[in-house]
Amino acid sequence: MTTDVLTEEAFARNLNTTFRVPLEDGRKVELELVEVAGYKDRPDEQQGMERFSLLFAGPAEPLLPQASYTMEHERMGEVMIFIVPVAGTGGGFRYQAVFNFHRK
């Protein structure tokens, strides 16, 4: 997977869509992309940098521990994303992914 797919713009086009995380036991956990937050207005912004974060909403069970996961998406295909559980909600968990890299 190249970073060409992992851009703020690509994720923003897929806001409010479902990413599926296959588990070892054969189940798939569905995470909805609920927020894409860019960091373009920072004064220390360097040209050619891609800086943004994603927020996913997931179910109460199972809780996905902090790790890299292969996620399947209808339009984006398979993407590997490192997520961190950041908050419990009444009916599930929120997960965050942060991206900070130089574009080629």
Image: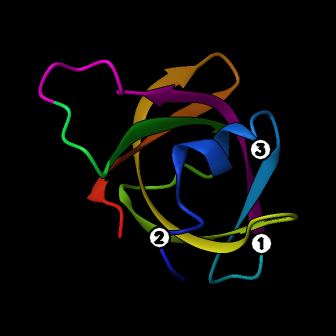
Q: Earlier in the sequence, mark 2 or mark 3?
A: 2
Span highlighted in magenta in the image: 28-44
Q: For the point 12% across and 28% down, which residue is it?
A: 44
- What crowding class fits label 1: few (fewer than 14 Cα within 10 Å), some (14-19), or many (20 or more)? few
Check the image and name the residue furthest to the left.
Answer: 44
**Which one is nearer the viewer's eye here, 2 or 28?**
2
The residue carrying mark 1 is: 27
Q: Earlier in the sequence, mark 1 or mark 2?
A: 2
Residue at left offset 67%, top offset 37%? 12
Which residue, given by chain and number where applicable, does mark 2 sit on?
3
> Colour mode?
rainbow
Query: Which is in the foreground here, disc 1 or disc 2?
Result: 2
Q: Crowdedness of circle 3 by 10 Å Cα count: few (<14), some, many (20+)?
A: many
- Looking at the rendered structure, the kind of residue marked 2 is Thr
Mark 2 nearby-residue class (10 Å; few <14, some 14–19, many ≥20): few
Task: Name the amino acid, label 3.
Answer: Asn
Q: Position of residue 37 (x, y in %)?
A: 48, 26
For the C terminus, the image quarter is bottom left
Position of 73 relative to 70 (above/below): above
The residue type indicated by label 1 comes to: Arg
Mark 1 / mark 3, whichever is N-terminal:
3
Answer left or right for 25 relative to 49: right
Disc 2 versus disc 3: nearer the observer: 2
Q: Which residue is painted at 30% across and 52% down in the image?
A: 48
Q: Position of residue 101 (x, y in %)?
A: 28, 57
Q: What is the quadrant of residue 73 in the picture? A: bottom right
- In the picture, residue 94 is in which quadrant? top right
Q: Is residue 91 positioned above or below 23 on the image?
A: above
Picture disc at residue 72: none
